[in-house]
Amino acid sequence: MLRVDGLSHRFGNRAVLSDLSFALDKGGFAFLTGPSGSGKTTLLRILHGSLPLQTGRALVAGHDLAALRPSKLYQLRRDVSVVFQDFKILPERTVVENVALPLTVRGTPKARIERRVASILTALRLTELAHRPCAELAGGEQQRVAIARAVVAGPRLMLADEPTGNLDWELSLRLLDILRQFSAHGTAILMATHNRALVAAAPDAMVITLGGGEADPGGFDVGQAAAPDAAAEATP
Amino acid sequence: MTMRLIFSGIAAVLLRPWAHLGTILGVSATVLLCGLLALAGIGLDGAFARSQGVVRFQVYWQKGSDPALVARQMDWMRALPGVVEAKAFSPETALAVMRGSLGANAEPALPGGENPLPYTMLLGFALPGEDEGFARETYARLAGVDGVAEVRYNPVAIDAMRTLGLLGSRAALPLAALLALLVGLVVGNTVRLTLLRRREELEILRLVGATPWFIGLPLVCGAAVIGFLGSGLAVTLLAFVWSEVAGNLGAAPLWLDMASPPLWLWLALIGGPTLVAALAGLAAAMESNA
Ligand SMILES: Nc1ncnc2c1ncn2[C@@H]1O[C@H](COP(=O)(O)OP(=O)(O)OP(=O)(O)O)[C@@H](O)[C@H]1O
Ligand SMILES: [Mg+2]
């Protein structure tokens, strides 16, 4: 589903990712951790085709990033969804419209869209807000809208960038539960997070830790500490 | 799906026509300008092709001339060598023509019930080659006739109009290119502005898997609608101008008989800008995709 081999990335002469390798199977679930600035968002952007692949190989949901033509980028993005750190939802549109967007651009029939969106909104407890413009929502609510949009079309792989950043502990746990259910239904999930406790709450999940070299002072080796049986930068 | 995208592009313009009014008027002004020149070129060219080599004289007799004498003089003029066209007007027929052109309500004031119009005659001579001397001689001959008050003829005016006509027809291709360029720039810039305003929205659409087609088609259709509305407005104005101008040119002193412009010209003036606008929209959409 997702296979990364010897991936490196630099901005100018600053190396952000170096020689990264891991793989994630269909329905697999992995945490992506590392200090701020270690390149979590950068990796997710590369995997989603928003940044060019510089060195190494990446096979994402059957798409070879090195061979992907810009005109076929939309195919990658239909197979791979993202929950962005800054949500990237349309503030003046309603919750329903935002969540339906991936289905709308695919030309899915209206009735199917309505059914699908309604069930996702229920799962994420957004039904009450369905027809409110997103600009009126609280941060945590907007984040759940972003998550709903990322799962609505049943992607093969979901990349989530700090999806619990604006949620309280209880909601974070609930969200983790929901994401794990999705992965159990066949969607592979790669979730970037700072939250050690959350990583600890899923001890069977794989953990990929970034950024040894330029890490914050004080270290940050949550992955190994919290989930001793998961491999960092591992190839299962 | 495709139909929905087309409709959404058209609706985007039609639902907010004021936002696009500037562009529509810009297209209109461009089409109007080029259309006027094209009309002048095509219309005058055709008129000259038909009146090629004919010089027209209009002869006015003094008021109160003896009808019997005038009739004999008219017969003499008709028999002059080279005459290909002759139209005689008595004061009565001239008045009737005048009434007709002024409309039923506008009664020309007749002082003391008297008809103020003189006898007149329109004479067309086939010009032997490009002989200026012939026109001058003929002028002198007609003006020398007893009882003739005035003779008008029009080589200077005709030459000026002929030059204009030639200019118009020679400029046709560069004109069409200019038209395309201007419409493309005007509409292209508007679409680019639209893209700028919707940049975030379009970026999000792409992130969730929208095809270039999904994003581009509404833009192209919207641009085409702008081109169509703008050129349609211009062509409506042109048709009006034409009907006014053709009437005036068909009378003294030019007597240019303007056939109405060919249908293809009208179609080209609408279809061309619409197509160019659509292409400009496509270019802008592709540019933003890269
Ligand atoms: N477009 C860019 N140009 C130059 N440098 C960049 C660019 N994007 C990111 N960087 C740098 O790359 C490094 C990694 O950034 P990135 O956003 O991937 O970190 P992160 O792990 O997601 O951090 P956080 O946990 O705070 O979200 C940072 O030092 C950042 O300044
Ligand atoms: Mg980040």
Image: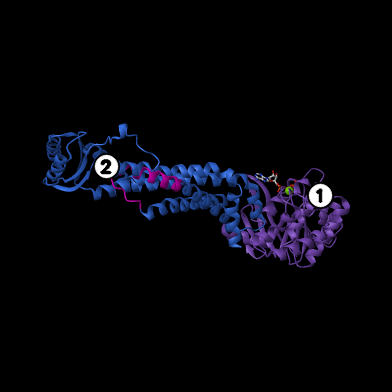
Chain colours: A purple, B blue
- Element at label 2: helix
Q: Position of residue B2 (x, y in %)?
A: 58, 62
- Residue A11 coordinates in the image, percent (x, y): 64, 46
Residue A209 in view in this figure: no
Q: Which mark is residue B92?
A: 2
Tell me, yes or no, whether the highlighted magenta stretch contains residue B238: yes
Give the x, y percent position of residue A194. Answer: 80, 50
Residue at 51%, 46% (x, y): give it: B187
Tell which residue pokes out farthest to the top in this image.
B111
Tell me which chain the residue with mark 2 is part of: B
**Above or below for A35 versus A68:** above
The chain to which mark 1 is attached is: A
Chain part drawn in magenta: B234-261
Query: Label 2 sits on what residue type?
Result: Glu
Residue behind label 2 places its C-beta within 8 angstroms of ligand 1: no
Q: The disc labelled 1 sits on which kind of residue?
A: Gly
